[in-house]
Image (cartoon, rainbow, N blue to C red):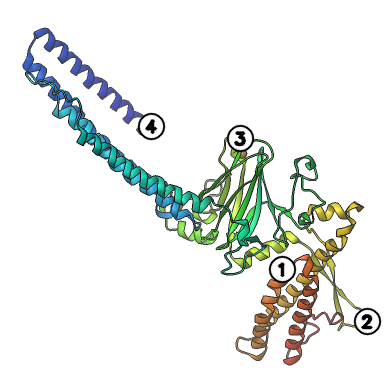
């Protein structure tokens, strides 16, 4: 309301000033008074100068006012490795544009003032001035060259795909410091939804073909391709921090655009032609929330849940940045950047499966566990298990996936047992130290169990036996806990 009234007043005042000026001009023409004409010219040029000052001050103010929402400033610094490069170029361009903007506006109004109409003063006719022309051609050329070359270099750094012949390959979780490994996910735009596909344990995304698309197969995965076996479609994007990610971007219908603002990731999704974007997230969702906690704009109640402040419920978001139809605004997915451990736990949930405890009623010492497949989320898996026999050659591999999941759950149980032992014993006591040492040995085994692929199923059994050995040794070594009641070691399997 205040703004509308202010704008109306400004417009009325401007109309008023213009009308007065016109009236004075007409009067001076009628009176044929050259001195008065000079006065009018001076008055109008003076108004121009005032306008220039007000306008430039308003520009600087609006720039200052909107800094908190501008990319690359304050809390809006990029959350990916390549992001600062983009921000730097934006700011560099802004810097040069700002200088040119201010100088040209000062020149414009200054010339109006300096060369306003005066009695007896004749304009100078200047055919051309080589010096001046050189100046206004060379300076912009040099600046533009820097901006364009800088932009081109940044573009090449950011957009260049991983070179295939240099040994880059995708895995579930890249090793620390291994530059050649990356996580590959696939984003398929569709009116009006994103399908996010993960590679599963093999780290490889299976092939798909549009004629295969049906109700049960939204992406058209080709089931004769083994790489599809462990692929799963996730309801959100979860990625570990500081690991390279390559997104394969496709579309099922029209043009969409894969856009994660804070990561400075933006790429068209084109039907029939995959595009790629690789980036490395550097700030977890939690760290980003802590960063936003100190920003006044984020210290206000959230509009959908006023018991929480905006920063507390911050989420990164994948949006569609291509106006693709009337449901375009709804094409969003939450993006979570988490620690490596949280990522592996999330993968566990996607893989599903659970263990059921079977207690032998005749022998309390004997506890065994059976594996419930649960929801191993591969469509391939369920498709095949539904009785489709034409894929017989890979039946072993399907079974292997089940074994891998089962073994992983058993190793995870060993970790749980030792965690329980540790938390139930006094810090510094023998049991505590035993549990602590056992956990230190078990954790790498659990990580390995989470990452084995179908071809490594035998390693996975060795790994499980090692884990069981560690638990058994810990329990026997310090026989201070009752192995039956507190630590249900799977004695039948040992
Ligand atoms: Cu879209």
Q: Is residue 97 left or right of residue 129?
A: right
Dot 4 corresponds to which residue? 1
Rendered-image quarter of ligand 1: top right
Residue closer to the observer: 415 or 4: 415
Q: Is residue 482 left or right of residue 243?
A: right
Image coordinates of residue 73 in percent, x first then y, are: 40, 52
Q: Is mark 3 within 8 Å of ligand 1?
A: yes
Residue closer to the observer: 103 or 307: 103
Which residue occupies 66% across, 39% down? 271
For this orientation, the residue located farthest to the top is 30
Residue 33 seen in the current view: yes
Q: Which mark is residue 450?
A: 1
Determine the CA span between mark 4 and mark 1. 60 Å
Q: Which mark is residue 324?
A: 3
Determine the CA span between mark 2 and mark 3. 66 Å
Q: Is residue 437 left or right of residue 464?
A: left
């Amino acid at each position: 309301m205040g703004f509308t009234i202010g704008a109306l007043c400004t417009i009325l005042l401007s109309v008023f000033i213009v009308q007065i000026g016109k009236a004075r001009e007409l009067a001076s023409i009628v009176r044929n008074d050259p001195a008065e004409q000079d006065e009018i010219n001076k008055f109008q040029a003076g108004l121009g100068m005032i306008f220039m000052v007000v306008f430039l001050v308003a520009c600087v103010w609006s720039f200052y006012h909107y800094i908190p929402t501008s990319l690359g400033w304050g809390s809006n610094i990029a959350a990916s490795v390549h992001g600062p490069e983009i921000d730097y170029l934006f700011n560099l361009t802004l810097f040069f544009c700002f200088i040119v903007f201010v100088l040209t506006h000062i020149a414009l109004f200054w010339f109006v003032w300096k060369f306003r109409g005066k009695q007896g003063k004749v304009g100078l006719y200047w055919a051309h001035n080589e010096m001046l022309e050189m100046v206004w051609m060379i300076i912009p050329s040099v600046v533009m060259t820097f901006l364009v070359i800088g932009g081109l270099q940044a573009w090449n750094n950011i957009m260049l795909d991983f070179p295939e012949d240099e040994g880059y390959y995708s895995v579930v979780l890249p090793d620390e410091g291994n530059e050649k490994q990356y996580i590959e996910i696939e984003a398929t735009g569709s009116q009006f939804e994103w399908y996010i596909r993960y590679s599963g344990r093999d780290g490889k995304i299976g092939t798909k073909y549009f004629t295969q698309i049906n109700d049960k197969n939204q992406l058209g995965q080709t089931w004769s391709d083994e790489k599809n076996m462990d692929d799963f479609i996730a309801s959100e994007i979860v990625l570990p921090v500081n690991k390279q990610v390559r997104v394969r971007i496709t579309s099922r219908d029209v043009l969409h655009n894969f856009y994660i603002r804070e990561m400075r990731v933006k790429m068209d999704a084109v039907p029939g032609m995959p595009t790629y974007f690789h980036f490395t997230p550097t700030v977890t969702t939690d760290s980003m929330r802590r960063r936003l906690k100190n920003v006044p704009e984020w210290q206000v109640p959230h509009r959908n849940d006023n018991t929480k402040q905006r920063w507390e419920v911050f989420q990164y978001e994948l949006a569609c940045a291509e106006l693709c139809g009337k449901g375009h605004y709804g094409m969003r997915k939450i993006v979570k950047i988490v620690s490596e451990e949280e990522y592996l736990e999330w993968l566990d949930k996607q893989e599903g499966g659970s263990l059921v405890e079977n207690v032998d009623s005749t022998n309390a010492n004997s506890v065994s566990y059976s594996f419930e497949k649960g929801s191993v989320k591969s469509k391939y898996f369920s498709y095949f298990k539904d009785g489709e026999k034409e894929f017989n050659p890979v039946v072993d591999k399907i079974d292997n996936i089940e074994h891998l999941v089962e073994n992983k759950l058993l190793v995870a149980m060993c970790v749980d047992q030792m965690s329980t032992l540790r938390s139930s014993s006094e810090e510094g006591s023998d049991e505590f130290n035993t549990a602590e040492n056992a956990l230190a040995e078990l954790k790498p085994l659990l990580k390995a169990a989470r990452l084995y692929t179908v071809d490594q199923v035998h390693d996975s059994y060795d790994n499980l036996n090692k884990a069981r050995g560690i638990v058994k040794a810990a329990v026997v070594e310090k026989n201070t806990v009752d192995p039956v009641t507190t630590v249900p070691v799977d004695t039948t399997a040992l």
